[in-house]
Image (spheres, helix red, strand yellow):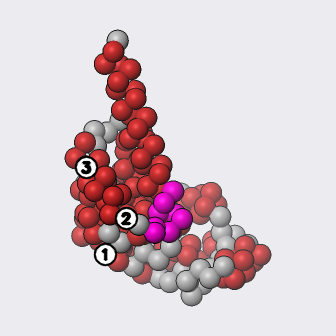
Amino acid sequence: MNAIELERDIKKELRASMNGILSARMREAGMPYKLIFGVELPRLQSIANEFPHDSDLANLLWSRNIREAKLMAIMLMPPEVFTPEIADAWAKTMVTAEEAQVLAMILLPKTKQAKEICKVWLERGNALQANCACLCLRHLLLKGEDLSAEEQIFNRYKEKTTGANLHLRKAIQALTEAFKAKKETQNVEDTK
Protein backbone atom coordinates (compact mmCIF):
# COMPACT_ATOMS: atom_id res chain seq x y z
CA MET A 1 0.00 0.00 0.00
CA ASN A 2 1.22 3.48 -0.75
CA ALA A 3 0.96 6.50 1.58
CA ILE A 4 -2.28 7.80 0.00
CA GLU A 5 -4.03 4.44 0.48
CA LEU A 6 -2.76 4.19 4.04
CA GLU A 7 -3.95 7.72 4.76
CA ARG A 8 -7.41 6.77 3.49
CA ASP A 9 -7.49 3.79 5.87
CA ILE A 10 -6.33 5.99 8.75
CA LYS A 11 -9.11 8.49 8.08
CA LYS A 12 -11.65 5.64 8.16
CA GLU A 13 -10.34 4.62 11.58
CA LEU A 14 -10.47 8.24 12.76
CA ARG A 15 -14.07 8.64 11.60
CA ALA A 16 -15.03 5.42 13.39
CA SER A 17 -13.38 6.73 16.58
CA MET A 18 -14.72 10.28 16.30
CA ASN A 19 -15.89 12.00 19.48
CA GLY A 20 -18.32 14.66 18.29
CA ILE A 21 -18.61 16.39 21.66
CA LEU A 22 -14.85 16.68 22.10
CA SER A 23 -14.45 17.76 18.48
CA ALA A 24 -17.01 20.54 18.95
CA ARG A 25 -15.33 21.70 22.17
CA MET A 26 -11.94 21.84 20.48
CA ARG A 27 -13.38 23.91 17.63
CA GLU A 28 -15.08 26.25 20.11
CA ALA A 29 -11.77 26.62 21.97
CA GLY A 30 -10.24 27.87 18.71
CA MET A 31 -8.04 24.97 17.65
CA PRO A 32 -6.69 26.06 14.26
CA TYR A 33 -7.45 22.98 12.17
CA LYS A 34 -9.64 22.48 9.14
CA LEU A 35 -10.86 19.20 10.60
CA ILE A 36 -10.92 17.84 14.16
CA PHE A 37 -12.17 14.32 14.88
CA GLY A 38 -11.86 14.67 18.66
CA VAL A 39 -9.98 11.38 19.04
CA GLU A 40 -8.06 11.15 22.32
CA LEU A 41 -4.33 10.40 22.39
CA PRO A 42 -4.52 6.82 23.73
CA ARG A 43 -6.91 5.88 20.92
CA LEU A 44 -4.68 7.65 18.38
CA GLN A 45 -1.74 5.60 19.63
CA SER A 46 -3.80 2.44 19.29
CA ILE A 47 -4.71 3.33 15.70
CA ALA A 48 -1.08 4.22 14.94
CA ASN A 49 0.00 0.78 16.13
CA GLU A 50 -2.03 -0.73 13.27
CA PHE A 51 -0.04 1.12 10.58
CA PRO A 52 3.58 1.01 9.40
CA HIS A 53 6.12 3.48 10.68
CA ASP A 54 6.86 5.14 7.35
CA SER A 55 8.36 8.55 6.63
CA ASP A 56 6.32 9.11 3.45
CA LEU A 57 3.09 8.40 5.32
CA ALA A 58 4.17 10.53 8.28
CA ASN A 59 5.11 13.49 6.07
CA LEU A 60 1.82 13.21 4.19
CA LEU A 61 -0.17 13.16 7.43
CA TRP A 62 1.84 16.10 8.82
CA SER A 63 0.99 18.15 5.72
CA ARG A 64 -2.75 17.85 6.41
CA ASN A 65 -4.55 20.51 8.39
CA ILE A 66 -6.18 17.83 10.56
CA ARG A 67 -5.41 17.57 14.28
CA GLU A 68 -5.35 13.80 14.45
CA ALA A 69 -3.36 13.43 11.22
CA LYS A 70 -0.59 15.65 12.57
CA LEU A 71 -0.48 13.78 15.89
CA MET A 72 -0.44 10.42 14.13
CA ALA A 73 2.38 11.67 11.88
CA ILE A 74 4.48 12.08 15.02
CA MET A 75 3.59 8.55 16.09
CA LEU A 76 4.35 7.02 12.68
CA MET A 77 7.60 8.81 11.78
CA PRO A 78 10.57 6.45 12.17
CA PRO A 79 13.01 8.20 14.56
CA GLU A 80 16.05 7.17 12.52
CA VAL A 81 14.89 9.25 9.54
CA PHE A 82 13.65 12.25 11.52
CA THR A 83 16.60 14.46 10.59
CA PRO A 84 17.18 18.04 11.73
CA GLU A 85 15.99 19.17 8.28
CA ILE A 86 12.67 17.32 8.61
CA ALA A 87 12.36 18.48 12.23
CA ASP A 88 12.79 22.10 11.12
CA ALA A 89 10.26 21.70 8.32
CA TRP A 90 7.74 20.28 10.78
CA ALA A 91 8.57 22.91 13.40
CA LYS A 92 7.76 25.71 10.97
CA THR A 93 4.22 24.33 10.56
CA MET A 94 3.60 23.37 14.19
CA VAL A 95 0.49 25.24 15.34
CA THR A 96 -0.47 24.02 18.82
CA ALA A 97 1.15 23.27 22.16
CA GLU A 98 -0.37 19.79 21.91
CA GLU A 99 1.68 19.09 18.78
CA ALA A 100 4.82 20.36 20.54
CA GLN A 101 4.12 18.23 23.60
CA VAL A 102 3.44 15.03 21.66
CA LEU A 103 6.52 15.60 19.48
CA ALA A 104 8.63 16.17 22.60
CA MET A 105 7.45 13.00 24.30
CA ILE A 106 7.01 10.48 21.48
CA LEU A 107 9.38 11.20 18.61
CA LEU A 108 12.08 13.78 19.27
CA PRO A 109 13.78 12.07 22.27
CA LYS A 110 14.23 8.91 20.17
CA THR A 111 16.19 10.68 17.44
CA LYS A 112 19.99 10.64 17.37
CA GLN A 113 20.19 14.41 17.03
CA ALA A 114 17.56 15.38 19.61
CA LYS A 115 19.94 17.51 21.68
CA GLU A 116 21.19 19.41 18.64
CA ILE A 117 17.64 20.05 17.43
CA CYS A 118 16.62 21.28 20.88
CA LYS A 119 19.60 23.65 21.08
CA VAL A 120 18.70 25.19 17.72
CA TRP A 121 15.06 25.57 18.71
CA LEU A 122 15.95 27.27 22.02
CA GLU A 123 18.34 29.63 20.26
CA ARG A 124 15.68 30.46 17.67
CA GLY A 125 13.27 31.63 20.37
CA ASN A 126 10.00 30.49 18.73
CA ALA A 127 7.59 29.71 21.60
CA LEU A 128 6.25 26.38 20.27
CA GLN A 129 9.71 25.16 19.29
CA ALA A 130 11.12 26.21 22.68
CA ASN A 131 8.21 24.47 24.42
CA CYS A 132 8.99 21.28 22.53
CA ALA A 133 12.73 21.63 23.19
CA CYS A 134 12.27 22.13 26.95
CA LEU A 135 9.98 19.12 27.26
CA CYS A 136 12.28 16.94 25.17
CA LEU A 137 15.36 17.97 27.16
CA ARG A 138 13.51 17.20 30.40
CA HIS A 139 12.66 13.76 29.03
CA LEU A 140 16.31 13.16 28.07
CA LEU A 141 17.55 14.42 31.44
CA LEU A 142 15.22 12.06 33.30
CA LYS A 143 16.60 9.20 31.17
CA GLY A 144 20.09 10.06 32.44
CA GLU A 145 21.52 11.98 29.47
CA ASP A 146 24.32 14.48 30.09
CA LEU A 147 22.93 17.89 29.17
CA SER A 148 25.66 20.24 30.41
CA ALA A 149 25.93 22.14 27.12
CA GLU A 150 22.17 22.25 26.68
CA GLU A 151 21.72 23.56 30.23
CA GLN A 152 23.83 26.62 29.42
CA ILE A 153 21.78 27.36 26.31
CA PHE A 154 18.57 26.78 28.26
CA ASN A 155 19.66 29.18 31.01
CA ARG A 156 20.44 31.89 28.44
CA TYR A 157 17.06 31.28 26.82
CA LYS A 158 15.27 31.40 30.18
CA GLU A 159 16.94 34.69 31.13
CA LYS A 160 15.82 36.48 27.98
CA THR A 161 12.30 35.01 27.90
CA THR A 162 9.62 37.26 29.33
CA GLY A 163 5.88 37.03 29.10
CA ALA A 164 5.88 33.46 27.82
CA ASN A 165 2.54 31.73 27.31
CA LEU A 166 1.26 29.26 29.90
CA HIS A 167 2.43 26.12 28.10
CA LEU A 168 5.95 27.48 27.61
CA ARG A 169 6.15 28.72 31.22
CA LYS A 170 5.20 25.24 32.43
CA ALA A 171 7.79 23.61 30.16
CA ILE A 172 10.50 26.01 31.35
CA GLN A 173 9.56 25.33 34.97
CA ALA A 174 9.55 21.56 34.45
CA LEU A 175 13.03 21.62 32.89
CA THR A 176 14.34 23.99 35.57
CA GLU A 177 13.11 21.62 38.28
CA ALA A 178 14.62 18.61 36.48
CA PHE A 179 18.04 20.31 36.30
CA LYS A 180 17.76 21.26 39.97
CA ALA A 181 16.85 17.69 40.99
CA LYS A 182 19.74 16.31 38.93
CA LYS A 183 22.20 18.65 40.69
CA GLU A 184 20.85 17.72 44.12
CA THR A 185 21.22 14.02 43.29
CA GLN A 186 24.80 14.59 42.09
CA ASN A 187 25.64 16.56 45.27
CA VAL A 188 24.32 13.72 47.45
CA GLU A 189 26.32 11.17 45.45
CA ASP A 190 29.46 13.33 45.64
CA THR A 191 29.25 13.51 49.45
CA LYS A 192 29.09 9.71 49.83
Looking at the rendered image, the quarter that the N terminus falls into is bottom left
Q: Which mark is residue 89?
A: 1
Residue appearing at x 29%, y 47% in the figure: 151
Q: Which residue is farthest top?
A: 192
Expressed as whole percent of the image width and height from the top left, the position of residue 188 reads 38, 20
Q: Amino acid at mark 1?
A: Ala
Residue at the (28%, 43%) spot, across then down: 147
Question: Mark 3 or mark 2, which is nearer to you?
Answer: 2
Secondary structure under tag 2 reads loop
- Name the residue type under label 3: Gln
Question: Which residue corresponds to mark 3?
Answer: 152
Q: Quadrant of residue 126?
A: bottom left
Instruction: Give the label, 3 or 1, closer to the camera.
Output: 3
> Could you tell me residue 157's position as x and y percent?
31, 60
Secondary structure of the residue carrying tag 1 is helix
Task: Please report the bounds of the magenta region as a residue range.
Answer: 163-170
**Quadrant in which residue 10 is drawn:** bottom right
Look at 25% across and 42% down and name the residue there.
Answer: 148
